[in-house]
């Protein structure tokens, strides 16, 4: 498989379980037991993906994610016992690509890893040079940049793809299932409420409700005149 995963987890028992399972799946594993070591290992052994615990010694996972995001787009999956909405929102605000709560199923974790890596590869291979403009929004599909009224907006890769999907399909209503299939892929087995979290996060970052909720149906962006 030739993919390296960095596990930043302070509980040795969990660290060992994840490491053994992923090595059996063909991944090369690098481990770190605190935030400082995790950042150092990231620089010493640049991974293809990071599995990041949040309640870490020295530097917590949120800070680690923010530090790494300033220098890399390497996908980061948060793996944590913090399962409330506020912490999930905080994780996505820190530009994590996914958020998995403990206790977790290792086969499910593997599928989520595969999905994130697949999206990353598709993003790198299929970027278009199209610039999409909608009201105050300018989206550059080649550079993965978004501007609102000339203000740069930092979106995660998944948030970017959701916004791009809406902008390319103005006036179309997308149900949660539509979005899960289009953005997460058919192999996603998590809670569909993750869609709500991403929509809320996009709205917050854009600073306006460009995305309209169609109660009982889904979401859409109005077609621009």
Image (cartoon, rainbow, N blue to C red):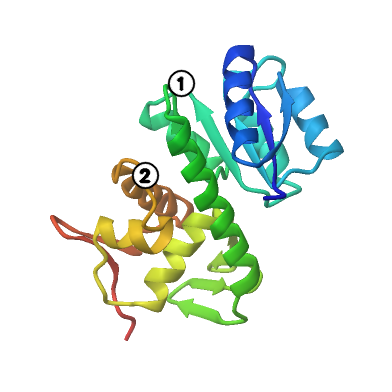
Q: Position of residue 27 (x, y in %)?
A: 67, 41
Residue at x 35%, y 64% (from the top left corner): 210
Residue furthest front as drawn: 24
Secondary structure beneath dot 2 equals helix
Residue 134, picture quadrant: bottom left
Q: Position of residue 157 (x, y in %)?
A: 55, 56
Q: Which residue is mark 1?
A: 81
How many neighbours does mark 1 have within 10 angstroms: few (below 14), some (14-19), or many (20 or more)?
A: some
Q: How many marks?
A: 2
Residue at x 52%, y 42% (from the top left corner): 93
Label 2, label 1: how far apart the Cα atoms are: 18 Å
Residue 145 shows up from this direction: no
Identify whether 132 is placed above or below 197.
below
Identify whether 38 is placed above or below 206.
above
Residue nearest the viewer, comparing 225 with 113: 113
- Residue 145 — which label? none
Residue furthest bottom as drawn: 225
Residue at x 62%, y 62% (from the top left corner): 121
Q: Quadrant of the C terminus?
A: bottom left
Residue furthest right as drawn: 44
Residue at x 72%, y 46% (from the top left corner): 70
Residue 189 shows up from this direction: yes
Secondary structure beneath dot 1 equals loop
Q: Which residue is mark 2?
A: 197
Verify CB contact (< 8 Å) between mark 2 and mark 1.
no
Left or right of 171? Residue 99 is: right
Labels 2, 1: front one: 1
Q: Position of residue 189 (x, y in %)?
A: 34, 44
Label 2 or label 1, whichever comes before in sequence order: 1
Q: Position of residue 6 (x, y in %)?
A: 70, 35
């Amino acid at each position: 498989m030739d993919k390296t995963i960095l596990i930043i987890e302070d509980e040795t028992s969990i660290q060992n379980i994840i490491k053994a399972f992923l090595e059996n799946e063909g991944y090369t594993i690098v481990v770190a037991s605190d935030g400082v070591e995790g950042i150092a290992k990231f620089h010493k052994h640049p991974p293809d993906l990071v599995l990041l615990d949040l309640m870490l010694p020295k530097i917590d996972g949120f800070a680690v994610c923010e530090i790494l995001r300033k220098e890399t787009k390497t996908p980061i999956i948060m793996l944590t016992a913090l399962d409330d909405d506020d912490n999930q929102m905080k994780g996505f605000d820190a530009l994590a690509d996914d958020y998995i709560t403990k206790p977790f199923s290792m086969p499910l974790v593997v599928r989520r890893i595969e999905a994130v890596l697949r999206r990353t590869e598709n993003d790198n291979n299929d970027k278009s040079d199209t610039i999409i403009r909608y009201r105050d929004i300018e989206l550059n599909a080649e550079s993965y940049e978004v501007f609102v009224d000339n203000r740069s907006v930092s979106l995660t890769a998944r948030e970017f793809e959701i916004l791009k999907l809406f902008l390319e399909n103005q006036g179309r209503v997308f149900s949660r299932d539509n979005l899960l299939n289009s953005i997460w892929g058919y192999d996603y087995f998590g809670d569909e409420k993750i869609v709500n979290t991403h929509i809320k996060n996009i709205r917050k970052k854009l600073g306006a409700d460009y995305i309209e909720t169609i109660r009982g149906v889904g979401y859409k962006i109005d077609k621009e005149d």
